[in-house]
Amino acid sequence: MDRQEDVVKVVKQWIVHPGRPAKLGKRDPGATPGCPSKAQAVEELPGMLEELRALQYRLFAENRRTVLVVLQAMDAAGKDGLVRGVFSGLNPQGCTVTSFKAPSPEELHHDFLWRIHKAVPPHGEIGVFNRSHYEDVLVVRVHDLVPREVWKARYDQINAFENLLAANGVTLVKIYLHISREEQKKRLLERLDNPERNWKFSEADLAERKYWNDYEAAYEAALGRCSTPAAPWHVIPADHKWYRNWAVAHLLLRTLRDMKLTYPAPRGDVATLKRKLRAMK
Ligand code: ATP
Ligand code: MG
């Protein structure tokens, strides 16, 4: 099969179809559809990043639309690794990464989307949300941080908010990095063994792991209820780091290609401008 067609099919497999359940339990975090080997991923990634940079430049030149990547995952699923492996390949002038931590007292005195909306980048840019408004139906739901009726109402509020963004020139690329419980354990143990990384690990991470099933249920609900035609969710198998990076680069490429980005027309007649410039001192 033609490689391009092959990859289009793969993107379809990652999508959570609007109105249907995500069925995370049935999706294999170790799968590698479309790219069976690490060697192939390593070979293809640089070319993909190069094309992404070219498309990013067009997005910037066009200056009419925004791309917003929403990244969610269990601990140690590789959000940071993905940002380093894929997004660091873009031009930093047009790409911002925002990490959302527990809300500050000021943020808590506003609605949950206040801090999120403020962080959406302007036209011409690519934004990456490392965690997002989805935390307000994930960690908040798992730990009962607000009453049930409050978080339950948020799925519809999120859909309305994302529809508003989409209708105003924001292309959302929502990505859930899907790792297995065993892979998380392996990575957390590796962190503890590595003096350069064990600062990242705390008692709190251990405590969160105990809630794995609750998080899985919360993700299942969030991905199922908030995958919409305007802003679908993608479940990226992430047990293999090389596959995760390859897959996200591909998803971004497809998104940017499908946007049919064009350069604006030159401001003035190029031939006249050239003639005038040549005539100048
Ligand atoms: P790292 O890989 O470096 O640990 P991280 O994204 O886990 O990255 P942390 O500072 O460890 O960063 O965690 C941020 C914490 O903030 C997470 O536990 C997350 O659940 C929490 N958080 C984010 N948004 C909210 C929210 N709206 N309400 C409550 N907690 C939130
Ligand atoms: Mg953490």
Image (cartoon, grey):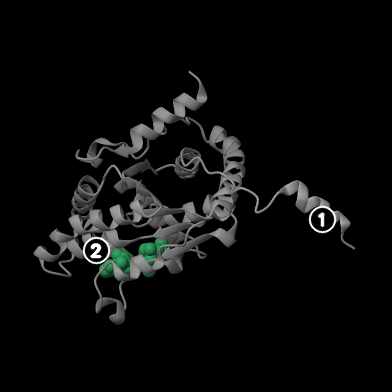
Mark 2 vs 1: CB contact within 8 A: no
Residue 190 visible (yes or no): no
Element under disc 1: helix
Q: Which residue is mark 2?
A: 136
Give the percent coordinates (x, y) of residue 205: 32, 64
Q: Kindly identify the amino acid type of the residue bearing the numbered disc 2.
A: Asp
Q: Is residue 145 left or right of residue 133?
A: left
Number of numbered labels in the structure image = 2
Name the foreground residue: 81 vs 273: 273
How many residues crowd mark 1 within 10 Å: few (<14), some (14–19), many (20+)? Answer: few
Which quadrant of the structure image shows residue 199?
bottom left
**Which label sits on residue 242?**
none
> Cα distance, mark 2 to mark 1?
58 Å
Is disc 1's CB within 8 Å of ligand 1? no
Q: Which residue is mark 1?
A: 276
Is disc 2's CB within 8 Å of ligand 1? yes
Q: Residue at x 11, y 68 (%)?
A: 147
Element under disc 2: helix
Q: Quadrant of ligand 1?
A: bottom left
How many residues crowd mark 2 within 10 Å: few (<14), some (14–19), many (20+)? Answer: many
Task: Give the mark nearer the N terminus: 2 vs 1.
Answer: 2
Name the foreground residue: 224 vs 31: 224
